[in-house]
């Protein structure tokens, strides 16, 4: 083969690119897969409150708590319900609420999951008042799935952009006529509110919230640590169309 | 433009393809997003036993239980531990074991999750013997994450292909020198055993197991119902390389 100057240039570039990737890979791997987060803790620990109620959806709660749990050197979690003690999920497996609404500590984030129990709780004035008081006192309010229906019914989302579960869209949006419902979204951020689409979307939203709080490098580290493929584009929602939205 | 015969053929094919997709789409949407599974229950309900222990990883347990929970018209779940009662996860939030190993019902599937607690349990002969007895008596045995280290240490995986968490690879594989460890896999099936890679991989594996038990259409329906993007190729594992495997 002739050693044409143009070919030599391209070959040199390929060699250079290969050499660069050999240098770059270990550094990238070290950042992504270190057992320690990419930045050390900075400032006081935050407190995340997860609201639970009979009939909550398992992954709505434990997808986000898995991701936040990777950062338990800088964030603590408390499960909050009507009263402390066992709380059954929609499909049976239970968790344990640490405290009642009345005993909830000061929170940095409060999160409301979905599940069939939301159908009951939107008609429970005491529950709605407790969620409203918690949300009013907390600088960051998140919902997963039909949890946004609870926030809407509590009057928290008037004039706020929000999304919800796509198969329960009609029910969820009926909980708040003044909410600026966004049908096509994996999750939606508006001021202190962040809401996700159905069930699994809560895990992607949690990583979005981690990115907002601690930077995107940290969120990527958390996802990789959990061997989770984060869908990091909040507008990328293939499930809206499946429900005709 | 000329109506060249060759162009006409290609255009006709495009028109035909468009017409076909217009016919196919509503049926596909109806199958994917109906509230009811695509096929009615057939035969007796199955029983899935999820083993839990202090220090289990949240998503290892609740990712699979979310997916199987979508089929609670044909499968029941029981949480099994040393003794019935509260069991704390690695990061704090607890679940409640329904029964002790001694009181476990006859199972169709038994699943062992991972989590930091596996480091203790591989040195707990009573736990290993209980897991072995349960696995020996159950036709389908699954593990998530470092749960395969527990199965390996119990002597269940000798000569069996299996995978595990990629960041804990060295520890997990050290639990069984005769296991045919597969480093690059989202999940691995071999006879009655099915094992997944780390944490989130358990959710993809659970859907793989649902596909095996009830067909791929059912698994796709479950994933869509949970607004979950199933990574359905068990060999597609981007996390092995990040840990240098």
Image (cartoon, coloured by chain):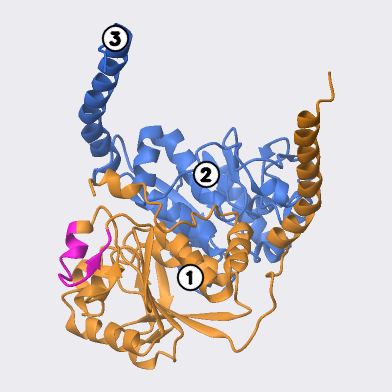
Chain colours: A blue, B orange
- Measured as percent of width and height from the top left, residue A18 is found at 25, 26
The chain ID associated with circle 3 is A
- Measured as percent of width and height from the top left, residue B23 is found at 81, 52
Region of the chain picked out in magenta, as a range = B170-182
Residue B163: image quadrant is bottom left
Q: CA distance from mark 2 to mark 1?
A: 27 Å
Residue shown at the point (26%, 38%) measured from the top left: A29
Q: Which residue is mark 2?
A: A205
What kind of element bears circle 1?
helix
Q: Nearer the viewer, mark 2 or mark 3?
A: 3
The extreme top residue here reads A5
Q: Is residue A104 visible?
A: no
Dot 2 crowding, Cα within 10 Å, few <14, some 14–19, many 20+:
many
Residue shown at the point (50%, 38%) measured from the top left: A232
- Measured as percent of width and height from the top left, residue A147 is found at 63, 54
Q: Is residue B84 left or right of residue A109?
A: left
Residue B69: image quadrant is bottom right
Q: Which residue is mark 1?
A: B209
- Of mark 2 and mark 3, the one earlier in the sequence is 3
């Amino acid at each position: 083969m002739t050693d044409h100057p143009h070919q030599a240039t391209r070959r040199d570039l390929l060699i250079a690119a290969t050499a660069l990737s050999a240098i770059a890979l270990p550094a990238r791997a070290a950042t992504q897969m270190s057992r320690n987060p990419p930045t050390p803790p900075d400032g006081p620990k935050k407190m995340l409150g997860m609201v639970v109620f009979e009939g909550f959806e398992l992954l709505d709660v434990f997808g986000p708590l898995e991701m936040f749990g990777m950062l338990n050197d800088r964030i603590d979690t408390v499960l909050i319900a009507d009263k402390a003690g066992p709380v059954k999920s929609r499909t049976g497996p239970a968790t344990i609420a640490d405290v009642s609404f009345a005993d909830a500590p000061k929170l940095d984030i409060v999160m409301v999951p979905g599940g069939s129990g939301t159908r009951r709780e939107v008609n429970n004035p005491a529950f709605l008042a407790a969620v409203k008081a918690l949300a009013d006192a907390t600088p960051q309010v998140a919902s997963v799935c039909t949890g946004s229906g609870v926030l809407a019914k509590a009057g928290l989302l008037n004039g706020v952009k929000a999304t919800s579960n796509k198969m329960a869209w009609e029910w969820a949006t009926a909980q708040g006529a003044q909410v600026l419902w966004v049908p096509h979204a994996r999750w939606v951020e508006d001021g202190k509110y962040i809401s996700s689409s159905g069930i699994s979307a809560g895990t992607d939203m949690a990583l979005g919230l981690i990115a907002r709080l601690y930077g995107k490098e940290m969120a990527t580290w958390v996802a990789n640590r959990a061997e989770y493929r984060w869908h990091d584009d909040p507008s990328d929602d293939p499930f809206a169309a499946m429900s005709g939205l």
